[in-house]
Amino acid sequence: MTGPTPDHDSGGRREPGESRGSTGGRDTGVGADGRVPAGRFHARTAVVTGSAAGIGAATARRLAEEGAAVVVADVDERHGAQVAARIRESGGEAAFVHADVAREDAWRRIVEAAHAYGPVGVLVSNAVKVEIAPAHETTPESWERQISVGLTAAYLGVRACLDDLRAERGAVVLVSSVHAHRGIPGHPAYAAAKGGLLSLSGQLTVEYGPEVRFNTVLPGPVLTGLWDRVPEDERAASVAETAARRFGTPEEVASAIAYLASPEASYVTGASLLVDGGWSVMKSSA
């Protein structure tokens, strides 16, 4: 684990280990006049998993830019530590935790790192594992790896952070995918995990509301490292199947996540938000 260290709070706003404190269950992002200031996540502590690159890294940066102290959790130590370091260099607050979020013991370390700032008020579950093969060629071991990282980790994260989230009247955003609704060859376990996140979000919404809000985002063709293995002709075909006629960016998905996690979405819970450039509705034939 690379957690908070004596120099992790380079913004100088607080001594290391000095808690930001609880928001007391109040939505601190909205003023008395109903306006939302730039720091929508002021005094919030956020945990973002799968945040060493792509959508997770963009989300960590976005939440930090808007005032959150962010715990960057990932198995990729080099890139995860870089994300946290760059947030601090920009004047934000962040710590990196090397963690396999599919393991329960990792969540104890993540929560401990978060508590150096304060109770967890925002949880973004973005970790993913993709191993491409049709169902009959997917081994039970591969299936379990993908389900554990893509679905079980979300359950473990909510379980570990639930007391904080309830006390903070917090928000959870689960990063699903258009694969939850549309079948694409070679992704049986990935699709099952992403579909499971939708069902899990709905179940958690009814179990833990009104204290905690749960929502999902469903990205479509968003240009992250997962596309590195995809041939150029297949990339072009995916872009052609969007109404936007382009790839989305991680920052565009992060914007949607930030909205769902913010006080502006205070009456939005149990919802799923497509961020796919119209991919889900686009058809090339009658």
Image: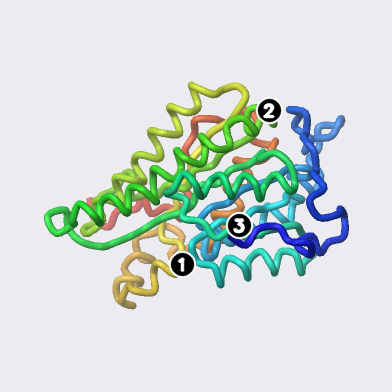
Residue assigned mark 2: 167
Instruction: Note whether 165 is above or below 193 in the view shown.
Output: above
Q: Earlier in the sequence, mark 2 or mark 1?
A: 2
Q: Earlier in the sequence, mark 3 or mark 2?
A: 3
Return the x and y of residue 91 as percentages of the image width and height.
80, 63
Which quarter of the figure is the N terminus placed in? Answer: bottom right
Residue assigned mark 1: 223
Circles 2 and 1, Cβ within 8 Å, touching? The answer is no
- Labels 1, 3: front one: 3
Which residue corresponds to the image point at 12% horizontal and 55% vertical from the top-left? 136
Return the x and y of residue 272 as percentages of the image width and height.
47, 38
Which residue corresponds to the image point at 81% horizontal and 32% vertical from the top-left? 34
- Give the quadrant of residue 41: top right
Type of amino acid under label 1: Leu
Return the x and y of residue 239 as percentages of the image width and height.
38, 66
Residue 70's disc is: none
- Labels 2, 1: front one: 2
| Element assignment for label 3 | strand
